Image: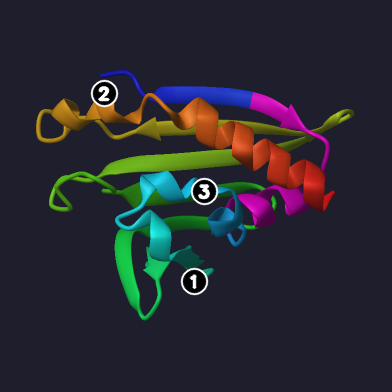
Amino acid sequence: MDPIRNAFVVDATPALAFEVFTLGMGSWWDRAYTPDPDSFDGIAIVPEVGAPVAMVHGDSSYPFGNVTVWEPGARYAQTFWLAMDPAHPSTLEVTFTGTDAGTRVEFEHGGWNDDNASYREKYGDWSLLLDRYRAAVAETG
């Protein structure tokens, strides 16, 4: 099954685009896509391979993946099981490439297989989330 892909250019360095996508994810993530929108406090990512990626709600956290690639300013990847069976996660991979106009961001939500393909249709809103990411980059830059 084909991955969900998006590509675009942001007016920022690759280092800043990477930082906003990863460590700033909680600032651009839409709280509607969390277990409890009213108590959403952000997303915690420890910057190392193997670390959990978790939604933070007050004193509780809800892991929805693990970091699989951490290359600041170049590439980020994680397993992804938000609203899915964690035993059969999908994957997110994002690359950041400097251009004359800023940074080309290539986003891919893949890793679809027979065990998780039934969840794929839930993720049609990535373009909306990535619009929020672009706005966050513009506000930061």
Residue found farthest to the bottom: 59
| Mark pair 3, 1: CA separation | 17 Å
Q: Is the residue marked by circle 2 packed among few (<14), some (14-19), or many (20+) residues within 10 Å?
A: few
Q: Position of residue 7 (x, y in %)?
A: 60, 24
Residue at 82% from the left image edge and 43% from the top image edge:
12
Q: Position of residue 17 (x, y in %)?
A: 71, 47
91 part of magenta stretch? no
Q: Earlier in the sequence, mark 3 or mark 2?
A: 3
Q: Position of residue 137 (x, y in %)?
A: 74, 45
Pointer 3: what residue?
Answer: 29
Q: Which is more foreground, mark 1 or mark 2?
A: 2
Q: Secondary structure at mark 3?
A: loop
- Confirm or deny contact between disc 1 and disc 2 (CB under 8 A): no
Colouring scheme, one of rainbow, by chain, secondary structure, one colour: rainbow
Residue found farthest to the right: 100
Above-or-below relation of 72 to 103 = below
| Mark pair 1, 2: CA separation | 29 Å
- Marker disc for residue 121: 2
- Marker disc for residue 57: none
| Mark pair 3, 2: CA separation | 19 Å
Residue found farthest to the top: 2
**Residue in the foreground of this view, choosing between 21 and 43:** 43
Residue at 34% from the left image edge and 42% from the top image edge:
91
- Marker disc for residue 46: 1
Q: Secondary structure at mark 2?
A: helix
Dot 1 amino acid type: Val
Q: Earlier in the sequence, mark 1 or mark 2?
A: 1
The residue segment tinted magenta is 8-22
63 with respect to 13 (left or right): left
Disc tally is 3
**Residue in the foreground of this view, choosing between 98 and 81:** 81
101 with respect to 106 (left or right): right
